[in-house]
Image: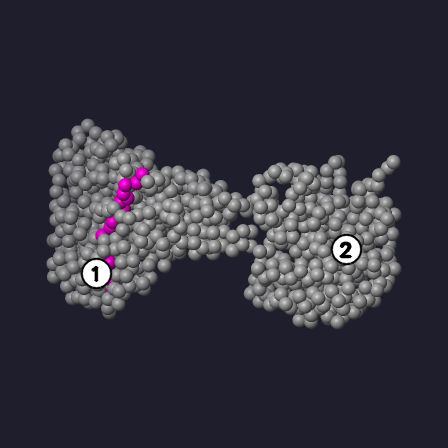
Amino acid sequence: MSTAPPALGVYVHWPYCARICPYCDFNVYRHRGRQAEQAALVDAIAADLVAHRALAGDHTLVSIFFGGGTPSLMDPADVARLIALCRRLWTPAETVEISLEANPTDAEAQHFAALADAGVTRLSLGVQSLEHGALKLLGRNHGAEEAARAARLARGLFPQLSLDLIYALPDQTPGAWAAALEKALTLDPDHVSPYQLTIEPGTAFDRAVRRGTLIPPDDARGADLYDVTQHILSVHGYSAYEVSNHARGPAAMARHNLVYWRGEAYVGVGPGAHGRLRRDGGWVATEAARTPTAYIQALSDKGLGHAQVDILTAQDRAEERLLMGLRIEEGVRWDEIAALDLHPGSERIAGLAAHGWVRSDAHGLRATPEGRRLLDGIIRTLIV
Amino acid sequence: MAGDKRSPMTPTAQIRNFSVVAHIDHGKSTLSDRLIQETGGLTAREMKEQVLDNMEIERERGITIKAQTVRLHYRAKDGLDYVLNLIDTPGHVDFAYEVSRSLAACEGSLLVVDASQGVEAQTLANVYQAIDNNHEIVPVLNKVDLPAADVDRVKAQIEDVIGLDASDAVLCSAKTGLGITDVLEAIVTRLPPPKGDETAPLKALLVDAWYDAYLGVVVLVRIIEGRMTVGQKLKMMQTGAGYQVDRLGVFLPKATPVDSLGPGEIGFLTASIKEVADAAVGATITDEKRPTAHELEGFKVAQPVVFCGLFPVDAADFEDLRAAVGKLRLNDASFSHEMETSAALGFGFRCGFLGLLHLEIIQERLSREFNLDLIATAPSVIYKITLTNGDVLELHNPADMPDPVRIESIAEPWIKATIFTPDEYLGAVIKLCQDRRGSQRELSYVGTRAMVVYDLPLNEVVFDFYDRLKSISKGYASFDYQLEEYRTGDLVKMSILVNAEPVDALSMLVHRNRAEARGRSMCEKMKDLIPPHMFVIPIQAAIGGKIIARETVRALRKDVTAKCYGGDASRKRKLLDKQKEGKKRLRQFGKVEIPQEAFIAALKMDDD
């Protein structure tokens, strides 16, 4: 009797964008004028996947995620090729969730049917907002009506549709945000990821904040908007299974992202992608070469895209488990965080539990919905 | 070389020892420089502006910290060659004892008054000291070339306020050189020569001492009787310590060696003395084998009156701070330090100073010369606490206050403060003094300037009084003080509690009537300085168990990263590592973390 090998998710980073958004701090590059490089990159990614199979060994492939950048700019044939390769390298689970991030522009929507044919089962649409002023502020290259059109098209083509939204824009009142959210829900998504606008260092928004032309939301306003989000989504039947992720039923939860939050293994391919793999009874963190050129070069030199592989100590691993695991409803198991000297009787935990921010039982530790809103502080209390 | 060693032959009748008494900015240094130049002590090329104030801080602040001396050779109108020794005294009340010893080394003084500004508070304190030392005093009106100079008014002021005859006052302008010869002639003709038997056993006054990186401790002496020679074995009468003279010299103003010094002469010696603390100002130096019968009067050990804790901002700098205070102490025996630990600020030193200026100078030297980033706690004075069992304790640090039930009474030092101010600010000055628990002793007018004398508790003055005075008078008021006496008062220890935990670095002794206002302002400040936590943080000021002021730091309502996926785990973990590192700059009080910066800001002494 053999049991199934452990679960594995594959992340494919496609770093090109038609334009760079002013709030984005991801590893992204302009799309235009890089066609030759893109063809070389697909080959490099394929070679890296093969190399990873040798490194990670057999796993049950539960998900593939094309993220970016803007992977909806990829040639659907390349998407199909990489999916097929993954399915060949690892043992596919009964259902493999295949997600792809897309921008809701008319141009990209033209590829949706081909992407669905290529095997994409879940489209994560970066709608961000359905309001003209907000889209302009966010520097998006699509209009509200265009985004709605893309979403309606995707709805008919993919088994799962997820919408990304951004809130806490300057001067956005809870009422205005509630209306915007309700409007997005009329597009009938299975899954919604509403993110509070975060000013990341080095972005155009960061510079605007420094200049004083953009005032970032404070915690009180953020909390009000967060509460509105939780309320509206729960009324509409979406459960908050993670800080910024809501699903219409367990089947609609993002399986790939659960890999991260549950601490399962994942392979990261493409420029700058991160992975977590088991090795010698412990875990290693992989990080691919950051620029497309360096990544392609690394593959041709060494046959592997990693710029570095770090061995995670038991404490590193436990910290990551706490960081990631408390974000989801199911929390972390005690054995996963034992290296942090955290156990059911810990004084630090008792203090947090007394405030109603965490709950502990025989199985493990969870953040309550109240606590999740203060999660960074809770983690600092537990670790720092 | 031999040509320089001309001192032995100067008869005492041709020596004049004098100091210059003046308020800051009235031109003392410029006049001294001009006298040096006029008598040929330095060529024009060598003449740097204000040669006597040579420490960087002294230059910037226009004050003299250490006594400096210069020997001038002057051929007077009577045809004789005179040796004029100028002792430049520290002009500030913090160094009053050093001033008194410098004055004791002279027979006369020039009282320099700015002819446009008139008599100021510091002028008074210093001139009274000169009078106490039986000095002959020659009034000199400086800056008579300025359009605003009013010679008659200032002469009248000197007579009214100080009670000196100013009819023969010398008029000069140190800046232009006008009247400088008159000043020199007045020194020769109006100041008395020193007296002293050359054959008597050696008796010399230790005027000052400082540490020189090349020579070690350098001692400035005034020979009273007898003769001091190179190689002679000396004895410090107060301590009994013996030293052999390595070098003798005079300042011309360049250090110039001599073989011996006779009665009335002023010069320096080195004798392998290790620390300035071994060469106490005011001490009597004599010959080891043939000592003088009586030591000089007026010796005392300098006592610090103001205390504060000095802590490194970065705890890792503690050893550097220890080395730095040790080095400063080598050169400044009046500054005291002992190790202190504070829950809020970590390891540091409780330091004692002669006064506020002294405190500021030491603090500045530590940061400037030793490149240290420091936090200073609120300055405090020495309280005398009488316990119910009759014991009397001296309290230097509010953190060491005994249990109030054991306290019978607390006494605090009071000062007599003299303030000169233009008429239009008098109201504000009086209000400031009243607010600081002052009681008025005198109020008089000198032209359009008012002179008020107040009794004030020193602990109210150490708390930013001088800054407030300057600000309400737009910089015009001048202030000086003398320590008077200890008086019992209704003093209480006020604690600041953050989330019910007392914060030692912020506790202070205050008068009961002032506690509420002080407590409220402290709580308000801390409220803005402590970042919001996950819970509400009460900040309270308390006397014993009684809360007298309260503020609240609101709770943080949202603190969570919006996006956290596979690529974020490493980044978040590294951020946590950084926070662990950053925690070293935070001080933990129960569950509350207070950034070091909050203490620095809260302890800044801006009141009201």
Count of number-bearing discs: 2
A185 relative to B286, above or below: below
Q: Which amino acid does label 1 sit on?
A: Met
Residue drawn at x 57%, y 59% is A220
Residue A181 can be seen in this image? yes
- In the foreground, A366 or B98: A366
* Residues packed near mark 2 inside 10 Å, few (<14), some (14 to 19) or many (20 plus): few
From the image, tell me which residue sits under label 1: B451
Q: Are marks 2 and 1 on the same chain?
A: no
SS for callout 1: strand
Q: What residue type is labelled 2?
A: Gly
Task: Give residue A249's mark.
Answer: 2
Q: Distance between the residues labelled 2 and 1?
A: 85 Å
A17 relative to A4, above or below: below
Q: On what subunit does the disc labeled 1 rest?
A: B
**Which of pointers 2 and 1 indicates the residue nearer the eye?**
2
